[in-house]
Amino acid sequence: MARLRPRKDRVFSGFTESETARMENLLKERGEESLKQNFCSKLATSFNRSAGRAGKTPVTWKQIQSCIQNKLQDVKAKTTSSPIASNEPVAPPHVPVSNDLPDCSSEMLKVQMVPDLSELEFEARSSKDGAWYDVATFVTHRVLRSGEPEVRVRFIGYGAEDDEWVNVKKSVRQRSLPLEPSECQKVKVGDQVLCLQERTDQAIYYDAHVMKIQRRLHDIRGCRCIFLIHYDHDNAEESVRLRRLCRRPSY
């Protein structure tokens, strides 16, 4: 079964303010215990029976678990210092880095072309499935004999055993932005987007392009427009709602 690396604030945004506040308080009180299926199932039942959810799509325990997991990851990520601003870390012993190779930090600055990396969030493409995941930290860096810069990435929600070496120029970029219902007009035919591909055993983000847009009037549930997208990695096409799309940032 493929691994699920949820992206914060992206997959499930259909919670009310009171529900979000309740989950945040429960996370503070119970910590990781609030991620248990039993606990999330009871919370889902409570939410779905509340007057505030009348007329809204029922939530599942998996959606609640994912939301709480994302919030937990956010808390952990904020306590992690920026690897670019900190002292150069030591490379893992099993991955030798030659001392005569040039420093990669200047290359990263050129590639990203932004003034202050410490205030940005990044995503990286995994070599294992070609999908994009949020970066928790850059553990270390190196430059190959070919001159290509690489960074060792730790993904949000995963430990050191899942770290990967990725090419800075090809597989690291500023984090894509989740779209709000009021922003649907920003999406145009031909745009490159990041789309959540939902399958029975996984839900992960891939690069895609917008092929066609069916504009619809918004209602109490938000944007009802339909977007026909073409996935770049497997050439599949699918009609999706706005909630599954993220746009690329513009400088």
Image (cartoon, rainbow, N blue to C red):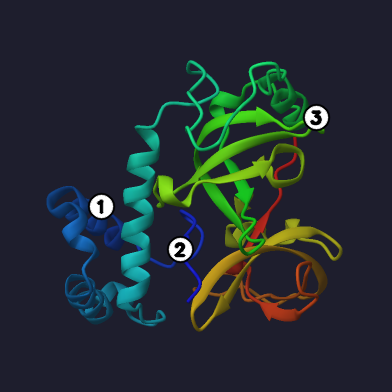
Q: Is residue 17 above or below residue 140?
A: below
Relative height, residue 173 to residue 36 (above, below): above
Crowd tier of the residue under label 2, counting other residues whose Cα lies within 10 Å: few below 14, some 14–19, many 20 or above: some
From the top left corner, tell me how far across and down residue 4 is, in percent.
47, 66
Read off the residue under disc 3: 147
| Distance (Cα) linking label 2 and label 1 | 14 Å
First of labels 2, 1 by sequence position: 2
Q: Are marks 2 and 1 in contact (CB under 8 Å)?
A: no
Mark 1: give few (<14), some (14-19) or many (20+) Cα within 10 Å.
Answer: some
Q: Residues within 10 Å of mark 3 (few under 14, many from 20)?
A: few
Report x, y in % for residue 210: 80, 68
Which residue is denoted by mark 2 in the rendering?
Answer: 13
**Is label 3 in a helix, a strand or a loop?**
loop
Upstream in the sequence, badge 3 or badge 2? 2
Q: Residue at x 66, y 21 (%)?
A: 105
Identify the residue shown where x is 41% and y is 51%.
Answer: 158
Between 240 and 196, the one nearer to me in the picture = 196
Quadrant in which residue 18 is drawn: bottom left
The amino acid sitting under disc 3 is Gly
Say which label, 3 or 1, has the lower sequence index.
1
Q: Are marks 3 and 1 in contact (CB under 8 Å)?
A: no
| Relative side of 51 to 85, left or right | left
Give the residue at mark 1. Answer: 24
Q: Secondary structure at mark 2?
A: loop
Q: Amino acid at mark 1?
A: Glu
Residue 102, placed above or below residue 126: above
Side (left or right) of 195 relative to 18: right
Q: CA distance from mark 3 to mark 2?
A: 42 Å
Asked if residue 17 shows in the view, the reply is no
Mark 2: amino acid: Ser
Q: Position of residue 3 (x, y in %)?
A: 47, 67
Q: Is residue 159 left or right of residue 232?
A: left
